[in-house]
Structures are given as structure tokens and as C-alpha cells.
């Protein structure tokens, strides 16, 4: 590799910074009322978001300029650390319960989500493992089942918290790497049927998940319970119209949409900035995904290519799930919108991963 590398992909960088900027504006606008009510400071959420964004941008600059082979060298150690954190977070007294899930490590309001780290850790390790020249993933028993077993173990630990949304993103991104590595479609199709049966079992095993499904199918059947979030989200999106009510003019952020600065921030964005504002956000994500997949297809190194696929898969799946929930096409899962929603570890880890993608873009043709 050349000592002096070319600049990273400009379109990718612009889309990342544009989404991050819109996120800052919307975190303040969507969360100002709740922040003032709970903390006496309407800038509470945006000040914390600025701190995490600064940390994330520092990490992104570091990873964008670090040799991508370093990640390959430490991928196994990173995955072991992620598994360790997933285990200790389940221990009462160590793991912190928030929103009904024991998924946080930390003190008071400051904490990290080990499941967020596992998404990146799994992507890095699978990219290293499946890029080996002597690895034959077309073999079902020796090639496909070992990585699937590893993915299943991580997914199982995340579900013990429980955190179906983050587990689904990790699972989807990992399977995209498996597919890109050359797994046979008939093998994946067979396993997809088993996975669908397992998913149904997970839903039936926990009554609250079944209620979310029924609430999603007919939210007005329980408007004050399982259907409340979806109904309030649609009440926000509808009045937004083409141009929106105006920045800061949302009515649904006044204690109607729960946690408007996190999972349902896109509903407030659509209410204030309208269809045009929502379309701009979607176009920026499309540019990000397009440039990311182009990088994955044009880089010569197989490890870097699979790594790019995993990172873009993580972003795309998270965007699809979040917006699908907000507009009522999917059940509520508790997934944030990348670079837009308020969140510490999720924002920092996302910027770190996108820094790796920017680094890979330096080697793309």
C-alpha cells in the first residue's frame, strides 16, 4: 500500500457530516421540552449529544487515518472483549436496567451498551474470518455453520437482556457478510426458514413482544397501550404535510410522543420539516449506502470489502427498522436512527465504524 494515501470518499464524508448536523438540530428541537421538564435545561440533550459527537468525530478521524490491517490484527481480541461485556451486563448489580432491559454498563446517566460494541466487533471478526483464502464457506457443516453458531451465541446473549432491536441489526449485518463471502443461497434459504420459526418462537415466548405485534397490526385496538407510540407518531407525521410546521413548532413533542429525541425523532422531523425534510434525510442515507457499497465492490482487499459490507449493512438495516417503525410499517423495536437520534454509545460507535469505512475508501478504485 502507498505511503501517501488519497483522500477518503468525499460524497461519503459529506453525507455523514450532513446527517450529523441535522441530528444535532433535531435533538435540540425534539428534546428541548422534555429536557426542560425533567432537567430544567432545554439544552440538556443537545449538550450531551455534542459531547458524544465530539468524541465520535475524534474516533472517526483516528480510524479514517489508521491502517485497516490493524483492525484485522485485533479483531479476535475485540470480539472476546465484546462477549465478556455481554456476559457481565447480565449480572444483577453490574448491569443497569433501562427501559425494561438490562443492557447498560455505567454509573447514573452515563453508560455504554455492550450490544452496540458487539455489532462492530462481530462485523470485524467475521470479515477477518471469512476473508481467509483457505476458508470454504460453500461447505454447509464446516464453512457456514461455525460462523452462524458464533452469530447465534451473540444474538442469544443480547436477547437475554432482552434487546430484540439491536440483536436484529447485528444479526442482519452479520448475515450480509456471510452472503457477500460466498455462502450458497440454498443453504441460506434453508436456514432462513429455521430462523423465521425461531423468530416466531421468540415472539410467542414473551407476551410483551406479542402485544407489540398485535399493536402494530391494529394500533387503534389499544390506543393507550401497545398502539400508543405508533398512533402518536402518525399524528406527528400527518400534519407535517409537504413543508412541515416549521423548525421547533412540533406539537407532539409536548409529552405525546415518548422519548421524541431518540427512537421517534424522525416523526418530529417530519412534523417540523415535512415531507421535504424527511426526503432530504432519506436521500442522505441513500448516498451514504450507495458510496459504501461502491467502496465494498471496488476495493481489492477481501477483508476490507467484507468489512465495508458489514458496516453499510449495519447502517442500512438500522435506518430501515427505525423509519419502518415510525411510519407504522414495523412493530416497535427500540432502534435509534443513525447519526440523527440522541444517544451516546450508539453515536460514538457509529462514527467510529464510518471512520473505518472512510479509511477503506482510500484504497478503493
Image: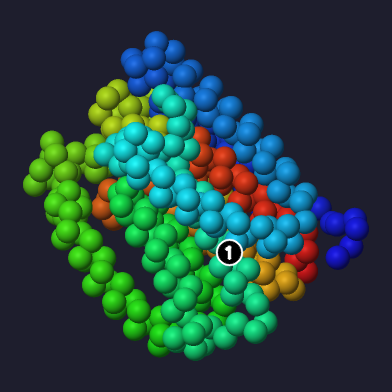
In this view, 303 is above or below 285: below
Provide residue 255's location: percent of width, then percent of height: 27, 25
Quarter of the picture containing the C terminus is bottom right
| Mark 1 burial class by Cα count in 10 Å: few <14, some 14-19, many 20+ | many
Q: Name the side, left or right, on which 176 lies relative to 188.
A: right
Q: Name the side, left or right, on which 40 lies relative to 333.
A: right
Residue at image location 40% in from the left, 32% down from the top: 261
Q: Residue furthest right?
A: 3
Q: Residue furthest top?
A: 40
Quarter of the picture containing the N terminus is bottom right
- Residue 229 shows up from this direction: yes
Provide residue 187's location: percent of width, then percent of height: 41, 85
* Residue 293 location, quadrant: bottom right
Provide residue 202's location: percent of width, then percent of height: 23, 61
Q: Residue furthest left?
A: 221
Residue at image location 23% in from the left, 72% down from the top: 197
Residue at image location 41% in from the left, 45% down from the top: 88
Tag 1 residue: 125
Amino acid at each position: 500500500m502507498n505511503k501517501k494515501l488519497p483522500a477518503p470518499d468525499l460524497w461519503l464524508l459529506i453525507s455523514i457530516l450532513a446527517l450529523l448536523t441535522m441530528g444535532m438540530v433535531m435533538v435540540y428541537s425534539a428534546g428541548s421540552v422534555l429536557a426542560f421538564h425533567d432537567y430544567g435545561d432545554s439544552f440538556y440533550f443537545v449538550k450531551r449529544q455534542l459531547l458524544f459527537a465530539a468524541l465520535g468525530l475524534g474516533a472517526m478521524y483516528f480510524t479514517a487515518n489508521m491502517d485497516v490491517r490493524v483492525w484485522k490484527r485485533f479483531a479476535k481480541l475485540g470480539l472476546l472483549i465484546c462477549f465478556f461485556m455481554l456476559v457481565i451486563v447480565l449480572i444483577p448489580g453490574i448491569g443497569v436496567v433501562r427501559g425494561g432491559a438490562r443492557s447498560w454498563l455505567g454509573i447514573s446517566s452515563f453508560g455504554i451498551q455492550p450490544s452496540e460494541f458487539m455489532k462492530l466487533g462481530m462485523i470485524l471478526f467475521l470479515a477477518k474470518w471469512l476473508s481467509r483464502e483457505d476458508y470454504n464457506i460453500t461447505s454447509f457443516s464446516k464453512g457456514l455453520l461455525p460462523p452462524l453458531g458464533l452469530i447465534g451465541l451473540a444474538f442469544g446473549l443480547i436477547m437475554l437482556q432482552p434487546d430484540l432491536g439491536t440483536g436484529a441489526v447485528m444479526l442482519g449485518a452479520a448475515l450480509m457478510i456471510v452472503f457477500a463471502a460466498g455462502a450458497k443461497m440454498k443453504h441460506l434459504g434453508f436456514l432462513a426458514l429455521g430462523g423465521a420459526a425461531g423468530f416466531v418462537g421468540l415472539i410467542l415466548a414473551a407476551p410483551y413482544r406479542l402485544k407489540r405485534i398485535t399493536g402494530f397490526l391494529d394500533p387503534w385496538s389499544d390506543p393507550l397501550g401497545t398502539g400508543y407510540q405508533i398512533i402518536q407518531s402518525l399524528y406527528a407525521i400527518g400534519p407535517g404535510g409537504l413543508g412541515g410546521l416549521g423548525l421547533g413548532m412540533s406539537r407532539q413533542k409536548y409529552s405525546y410522543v415518548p422519548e421524541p429525541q431518540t427512537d421517534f425523532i424522525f416523526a418530529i422531523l417530519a412534523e417540523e420539516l415535512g415531507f421535504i425534510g424527511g426526503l432530504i434525510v432519506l436521500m442522505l442515507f441513500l448516498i451514504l449506502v450507495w458510496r459504501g457499497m461502491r467502496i465494498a465492490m471496488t476495493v481489492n482487499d477481501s477483508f476490507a470489502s467484507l468489512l465495508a459490507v458489514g458496516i453499510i449493512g449495519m447502517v442500512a438495516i438500522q435506518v430501515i427498522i427505525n423509519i419502518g417503525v415510525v411510519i407504522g410499517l414495523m412493530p416497535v423495536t427500540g432502534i435509534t436512527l443513525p447519526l440523527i437520534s440522541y444517544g451516546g454509545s450508539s453515536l460514538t460507535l457509529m462514527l467510529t465504524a464510518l471512520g473505518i469505512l472512510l479509511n477503506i475508501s482510500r484504497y478503493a478504485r
